[in-house]
Amino acid sequence: MARMHSRDKGKSGSSRPAHKVPSWASYKGKEVEKLVIKYAKSDKSASEIGMILRDTYGIQSVKVLTEKSVSQILAENGLAKQLPEDLLNLIKKLIAVKQHLEKNIHDKTSKRGYQLTISKIRRLVKYYKKSNKLSVDWNLDVDRLKMYLE
């Protein structure tokens, strides 16, 4: 099946590591949770924390060591953001495209990108409302986008 907004087909990538704690793992579950909390307090997102733990500490999978995802650890400690990270990233992209369109009114390609981004946000909001991660009455206010980033 082709991708939604491109003509690409298929999905390639590396396979995930095994779902067991390796014998060479130097960090235990509680230590990893403390590291996640430390980086969350320094205003890092869940994906940034995962990359830091992977690249700096050699932790291949937080979920294998702690039996919880980074997002679950953040939620338990009250450090989770109000909006999910992927939705925030799409809103940031929408702000950038909208600013570009204000300067370049006749840029039709950017207008199409703006429409696709809004479509992605609407689909994601629909999913988050169904899974109760967003309140049912939450709506995207396109005129006041920057308020979501605060």
Image: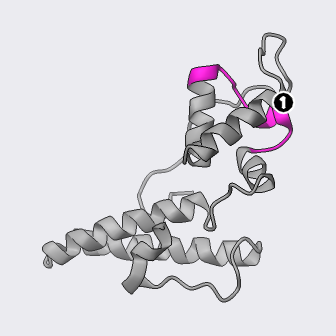
- Answer above or below: position of 144 versus 78: below
Residue appearing at x 70%, y 81% in the figure? 135
Colour style of the rendered protein structure = one colour
Answer few, some or many: residues within 10 Å of disc 1's Cα (few below 14, many 20 plus, some between 14 and 19).
some
Q: In this view, does 137 lie to the left or right of 48?
A: right
Query: With respect to residue 53, does 85 lie above or below?
Result: below
Q: How many marks?
A: 1
Residue 134 placement (x, y as % from top left): 69, 75
Magenta stretch in the rendered image: 56-69
- Residue 62 seen in the figure: no
Res 53 quadrant in image: top right
Which element type, helix, strand or loop, lies under badge 1? Answer: helix
Q: Which amino acid does label 1 sit on?
A: Gly
Residue to which mark 1 is pinned: 29
Q: Quadrant of residue 79?
A: bottom right
Quarter of the rendering containing residue 85? bottom right
The residue lying toward the viewer, choosing from 14 and 20, is: 20
In-front residue for pair 61/6: 61
Location of residue 102 in the rendering, given as x and y in whole percent from the top left corner: 19, 77
Left or right relative to 65: residue 143:
left
Question: Is residue 29 among the parts visible in the rendering?
Answer: yes
| Residue 62 within the magenta-colored segment of the rendering | yes
Residue 61 in the image, given as x and y percentages of width and height? 73, 31
Q: In this view, does 107 lie to the left or right of 27?
A: left
The residue that appears at 83% across and 24% down in the rendered structure is 28
Quadrant, the N terminus:
bottom right
Above or below: residue 5 compared with residue 32: below
- Identity of the residue drawn at 81% across and 53% down: 76
Residue drawn at 57 percent across, 22 percent down = 56
The picture places residue 143, in percent across and down from the top left corner, at 37, 85
Q: Nearer the viewer, residue 24 or 120?
A: 24
71 and 38: which is toward the camera:
38
